[in-house]
Image (cartoon, rainbow, N blue to C red):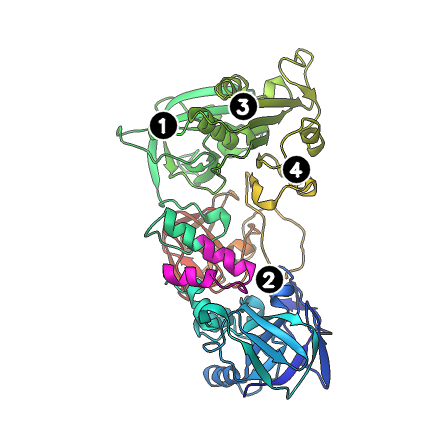
């Protein structure tokens, strides 16, 4: 009979790791006597990162003493103590390849339900002093599992673990773990897992995404259940020479470049809202520049249009504004990006400020050209008439829609700007204005503009009750970081790394606008190089398991060390465990 060997708890603490402060509850210590188990955790226990750990579905983490013995042999350690793997319950029996999701067990006076395998992150590697531990736990089929508390009660070391009922479908923890993290995702097994009511929402969402991806893109590579939204739309790496066929000045500081294939061939038709990357060399003896520009024109396989804001100190914009001529050839990537117009019949609310109009303008083109019957709102903020781009074009497109509406704000109108004709109101676009205009709260909201504009609107929409999955945003530079548990540090603009200059291949972080040489003596991965440059990054496991770091590979190729459990989609890269093979350009 299975039994409870030890109960361990621990409150989050701050530790030093690689020069940073990490807030973590991975350290657990055995307790004496009996402990009460409540709905969210064991009494006296806590988690440092509630996004990834804890909560009703992950109230209690369980690990087996048999797995302790396995790791003692594999890692050559003999000094493990109960709670070593961050578990609350150290148990004898109930192996991961025997316990099923949805099983009920009685321990002491409490009743539990198995909800999911453990999701490992870098902090277990810190605790075990083994950086690859997250990958090792997942690939070994010994992740451990979480329990939901069905009935609160008291437990103690020595309590028998009594099976109450078997989970429907009888899918073991090991099977469910492999179904998500390995490269094999059989459709019948995904559907089987989705029939288990006890499966936690996060895992359910991942399996649903895998099913949707198989339906929409049969034979596609990558793991749709793990890839972040920013890397969900893949594109082949490399650049294609396109000729500038037309240059238009949209306002005082914005120009549009129309680009066509040199050979008369076809382009990849973009999705509304996507962008391309331009590879520029302003000076023959100078460095390459990589800049991401949203496609702002009609969705076409014959021509792309990018619109560029000319900043006073912007190297790329100033170069294009002063030097680009009709007939010039520019190197352009495939369309990419996950900020795209979603299907459906809900109202579409397009909100932009300044040059942020470009991706939502492409969405407006798509809606107009398809004769959409959806309610469409164009809401835009500009400084004044001189800086108001695409005004005539927008009105023409709205005129093609049966339910198109617009409202324009000027923050500092000039004396000759006419309220009621050139613009509708003085001020800035904000949530109060949306409420006053009676913009439908149940619509899909698409936001693009400066970071302060995005932050204020996203906060306001959330407070207004708009669900997060209906708020879509695009940013001009590097996206928001994900560094779970790491204490906040002052934001710094991306920069060259301090210390010795690298001599390896060129690594370009396109969104951050920085190019550095690979430092083989300093950095173990592209992630570590990005961190040395303060490039915004996303990660959790740091060993090729979770895919939070998956990013677009705009050009070049990489090698992996260690190999990821499930490789990223073609055209993407896992920066946490890869290094460059020649020059590379990455979409971060």
**Residue 188 located within the stretch drawn in magenta:** yes
What residue is disc 1 on? 303
Mark 1 or 2, which is nearer the eye? 2
What residue is disc 3 on? 403
Q: Are marks 2 and 4 in contact (CB under 8 Å)?
A: no
**Residue 136, position as x, y percentages in the image:** 46, 73
What residue is disc 2 on? 52
| Quadrant holding the N terminus | bottom right
Q: Are marks 1 and 3 in contact (CB under 8 Å)?
A: no
87 sits to left or right of 300: right
**Residue 271, position as x, y percentages in the image:** 42, 36
Question: How far is mark 1 from mark 3, CA to CA?
Answer: 28 Å
Mark 1 or 3, which is nearer the eye? 3
- Label 3 crowding class (10 Å Cα cut-off): few <14, some 14-19, many 20+? some
What residue is disc 4 on? 457
**Residue 410 located within the stretch drawn in magenta:** no
**Residue 243, position as x, y percentages in the image:** 34, 27
The answer, for residue 71, to whether it is visible in the render is yes
On screen, residue 527 above or below 89: above
């Amino acid at each position: 009979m299975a039994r409870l060997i030890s109960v361990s708890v621990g409150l989050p603490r701050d530790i030093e790791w690689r020069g940073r402060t990490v807030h973590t509850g991975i350290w657990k210590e055995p307790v004496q006597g009996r402990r009460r188990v409540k709905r969210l955790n064991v009494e006296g226990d806590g988690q440092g990162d509630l996004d990834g750990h804890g909560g009703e579905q992950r109230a209690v983490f369980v690990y087996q003493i048999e797995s302790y013995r396995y790791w003692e042999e594999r890692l050559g350690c003999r000094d493990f103590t109960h709670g070593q793997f961050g578990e609350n319950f150290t148990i004898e029996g109930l192996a991961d390849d025997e316990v099923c999701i949805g099983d009920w067990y009685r321990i002491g006076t409490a009743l539990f339900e198995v909800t999911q395998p453990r999701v490992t992150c870098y902090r277990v590697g810190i605790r075990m002093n083994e950086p690859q531990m997250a990958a090792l736990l997942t690939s070994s089929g010994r992740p451990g599992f979480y329990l939901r508390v069905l009935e609160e009660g008291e437990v103690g070391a020595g309590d028998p673990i009594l099976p109450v009922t078997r989970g429907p479908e009888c899918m073991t923890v090991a099977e469910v773990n492999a179904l998500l993290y390995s490269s094999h995702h059989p459709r019948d097994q995904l559907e089987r897992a989705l029939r288990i009511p006890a499966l936690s929402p996060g895992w359910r969402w991942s399996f649903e995404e895998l099913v949707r991806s198989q339906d929409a893109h049969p034979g596609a590579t990558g793991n749709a259940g793990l890839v972040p939204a920013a890397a969900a739309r893949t594109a082949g790496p490399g650049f294609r020479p396109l000729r500038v066929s037309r240059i238009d000045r949209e306002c005082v500081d914005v120009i549009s470049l129309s680009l066509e294939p040199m050979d008369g061939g076809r382009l990849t038709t973009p999705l509304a809202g996507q962008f391309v990357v331009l590879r520029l060399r302003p000076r023959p003896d100078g460095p390459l520049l990589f800049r991401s520009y949203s496609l702002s024109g009609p969705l076409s396989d014959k021509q792309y249009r990018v619109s560029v804001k000319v900043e006073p100190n912007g190297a790329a914009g100033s170069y294009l504004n002063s030097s680009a001529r009709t007939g010039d050839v520019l190197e352009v990537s495939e369309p990419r990006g996950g900020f795209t117009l979603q299907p459906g019949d809900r109202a579409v609310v397009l909100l932009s400020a300044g040059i942020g109009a470009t991706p939502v303008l492409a969405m407006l083109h798509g809606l107009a050209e398809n004769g959409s019957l959806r309610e469409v709102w164009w809401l835009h903020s500009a400084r004044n008439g001189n800086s108001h781009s695409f005004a005539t074009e927008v009105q023409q497109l709205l005129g093609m829609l049966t339910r198109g509406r617009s409202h324009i704000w000027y923050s500092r109108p000039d004396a000759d700007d006419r309220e009621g004709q050139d613009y509708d109101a003085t001020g800035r676009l904000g949530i109060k204005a949306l409420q006053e205009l009676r913009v439908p709260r149940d619509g899909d909201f698409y936001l693009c503009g400066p970071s302060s504009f995005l932050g204020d609107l996203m906060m306001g929409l959330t407070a207004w009750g708009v669900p997060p999955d209906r708020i879509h945003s695009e940013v001009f530079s590097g996206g928001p970081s994900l560094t779970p548990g790491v204490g906040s540090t002052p934001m710094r603009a991306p920069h060259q790394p301090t210390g010795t200059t690298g001599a390896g291949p060129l690594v370009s972080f396109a969104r951050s606008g920085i190019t550095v040489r690979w430092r083989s003596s300093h950095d173990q991965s592209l992630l570590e190089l990005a961190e040395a440059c303060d490039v915004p990054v996303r990660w959790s496991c740091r060993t090729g398991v979770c895919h939070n770091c998956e990013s677009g590979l705009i050009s070049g190729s990489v090698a992996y060390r260690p190999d990821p459990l499930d490789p990223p989609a073609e055209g993407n890269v896992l920066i946490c465990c890869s290094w460059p093979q020649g020059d590379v350009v990455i979409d971060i």
